[in-house]
Amino acid sequence: MSVLIFAEQSDGAIRKSSKEAVSYGVALANQLGVKAEAVVLGSVHQDLSGLGSLGVSVVHHCAEEGLNTMDTRRYTAVMAEIAQSTGSQIIVFAHSITGRAIAPRLSARLKAGYISGATGLPDTSNGFIVRRNVFSGKAFMDVRVETPVKIISVNPNSFGVRELEGVAMVQPFQTSTVAGRVVTREIKKVNGQVPLGEAELVVSGGRGLKGPEHWGMVEDLAGLIGAATACSRAVADAHWRPHHEHVGQTGLAIAPNLYFAIGISGAIQHLAGVNRSKVIVVVNKDPEAPFFKAADYGIVGDAFEVMPKVIEAVRQLKKS
Amino acid sequence: MKILVCISRTPDTTAKIAFGDNNTKFVKDGVQWIINPYDEWYGLVRAIIIKENEPATIIHLVTVGGADVEPVIRKALALGGDEAIRVEMEPMDAYQVAVQIAEVAKGGQYDLILTGKETIDSNGSSVGPMLAELLDMDMISLATGLEFEGSTAVVTREIEGGEEISAIPLPLVVSCQKGMAEARIPNMRGIMAARTKPLKVLPPAESAVLTGLVSYGLPPSRSGVKLVPADRPEELVRLLHEEARII
Ligand SMILES: Cc1cc2nc3c(=O)[nH]c(=O)nc-3n(C[C@H](O)[C@H](O)[C@H](O)COP(=O)(O)OP(=O)(O)OC[C@H]3O[C@@H](n4cnc5c(N)ncnc54)[C@H](O)[C@@H]3O)c2cc1C
Ligand SMILES: Nc1ncnc2c1ncn2[C@@H]1O[C@H](COP(=O)(O)O)[C@@H](O)[C@H]1O
């Protein structure tokens, strides 16, 4: 018996959302008094024994080059092979783009109950009950997993990365699966940006900023504090900002430590995607903007006057 | 080409979320229902565009749910699609939905199965991948673009911090999100035509129960906003640094 954790790599290094999933899996293994093991697929340039510092004892590494790009069918088959060889009863993923694609597939393959986007550790005092968000963050539900093997994907920023001490044993894994039919043609990456789904701090702009030429204030603040940038749907629809920055009920749902919203009204569909943020700051010139009801801190004022001063104050703070 | 589009019904985005029966039932009184936006705006409209380019294309819609979902399926048919199939069942979880759709798909010889990225009520993004596994099909999740080169699909999907383009021979399951298509409004002709399009009702297939609901709950509301005067924005920065300890 062990908890098996899928540690996703990106360009040869373990992703942050996966480190969080590892910490979650390790905490769950401790709760159950079993071992935590990790899986890494594809070639990496990081010493994987370092994952021991997050608390895993073994890293199963399938280093085949062909696994550097994701093919959901093959990844699922390899995960099933490894889970079988380790006899793991619980398999943990990050609720990342890859995790969302593989975890449910593996669930169907193993007939294992799946919790999509867990926000906390399971309650194992009476069965196996896990909390997750539903109705786009407007509610949560507690779900009982009824099957012997259980699969969980962990919502980003809901658990945190917990550094411990230790060195993991790295075990090469030979898969009997072969390359599938998916041929990757091109990968386009916007360099240097914090991926929005994983970001701890997010600065976001709405239609109140009047046009894409005014996004300097969003980018300047984000740059100073190391935040990702986001926007409302109205802004993405107007093509002021790329679609992948759109947060809300029909965009990305995020739960950063800070969500700093400038010139966004706070429509119910927008709030649904951001209301799990730990601290919400709103700058809006309309005191009646609904966003203030969902905020922790706010300034009622014109963003064009307020934001340059906020940015200057942050710059001073960062200098000191 | 033969396409199956998975359509689910969800409460309107502004619906009040409340629970009854000891927090075990979503209160449906007064709730307006819509086609799940991801299924309507992206999956269905993409299928319609494929048919516009290739008129011999056949589009089937499938939904798993009780008779009360039919108005929503009719609305989907008003946008497009040749016929609809409803599996008579109140599913317990995503796996049960996937099992039913897989059963429908097995007999249909579909080249392409489209789902939404997720439902806006259960937010699992699970049905598509589960379905692909049950049918042993290739799948691309969270796709933002879909083109064809003969019988090969060229699919663009979101990855963290960018996008990836891959080529996969059909048949294929694709989950769709923003970028795939633009929302459309049904016209009068579509609404009239939808009335007479076939809507088949099938009995459910046997399916295992993997998970069960214990209860629902609502998140605690925030304690209230602390407003900083507009002429002292530096005070906001101080609070974020010293009180919230976030920057
Ligand atoms: C089915 C459905 C799904 C949807 N999904 C989403 C979603 O996922 N995400 C999303 O964001 N929206 C979504 N929407 C749209 C949503 O209802 C709102 O229309 C949208 O969020 C509004 O964007 P906004 O706040 O940028 O613009 P507006 O509502 O136009 O608000 C602009 C705000 O800026 C303020 N402002 C103006 N000038 C200034 C200034 N100089 N300084 C400071 N403040 C200023 C105004 O007071 C106002 O509050 C959805 C809608 C529907 C129907
Ligand atoms: N009851 C249902 N009937 C038909 N399709 C569904 C149903 N539930 C979910 N789907 C499809 O599966 C996708 C993902 O749903 P979910 O796993 O609930 O997030 C949706 O966008 C739909 O396309």
Image (tube, coloured by chain):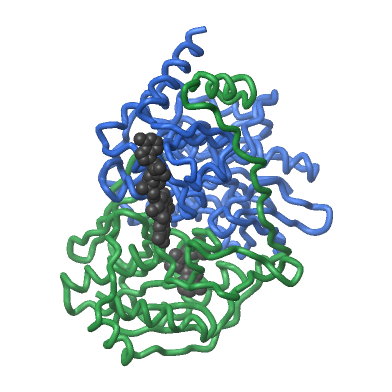
Task: Say how many tags the image has.
Answer: 0
Residue A278: percent from left, percent from top = 60, 37
Q: Residue at x 83, y 58 (%)?
A: A126
Q: In the rendered view, would you say A187 is above or below A183?
A: above
Residue B17's image quarter? Answer: bottom right
User: What shade does chain A have?
Assistant: blue
- Judge by depth and name the residue closer to the eye, A105 or A21: A21
Residue B224: percent from left, percent from top = 63, 40
Q: Which chain is green?
A: B
Q: Decide if residue A66 is in sight here.
A: no
Question: Is residue A49 shown left or right of residue B73?
Answer: right
Question: Is residue A16 shown left or right of residue B40?
Answer: right
Q: Residue at x 18, y 60 (%)?
A: B149
The furthest residue to the right: A125
Question: Is residue B78 shown left or right of residue B243?
Answer: left
The furthest residue to the top: A320
Residue A119: percent from left, percent from top = 64, 47
Q: In the rendered view, would you say B172 is above or below A206?
A: below
Q: Decide if residue A74 is in sight here.
A: yes
Q: Residue at x 70, y 54 (%)?
A: A130
Q: In the rendered view, would you say B101 is above or below A262?
A: below
Q: Residue at x 45, y 70 (%)?
A: B135
- Judge by depth and name the residue closer to the eye, B87 or A309: A309
Residue B131: percent from left, percent from top = 47, 68
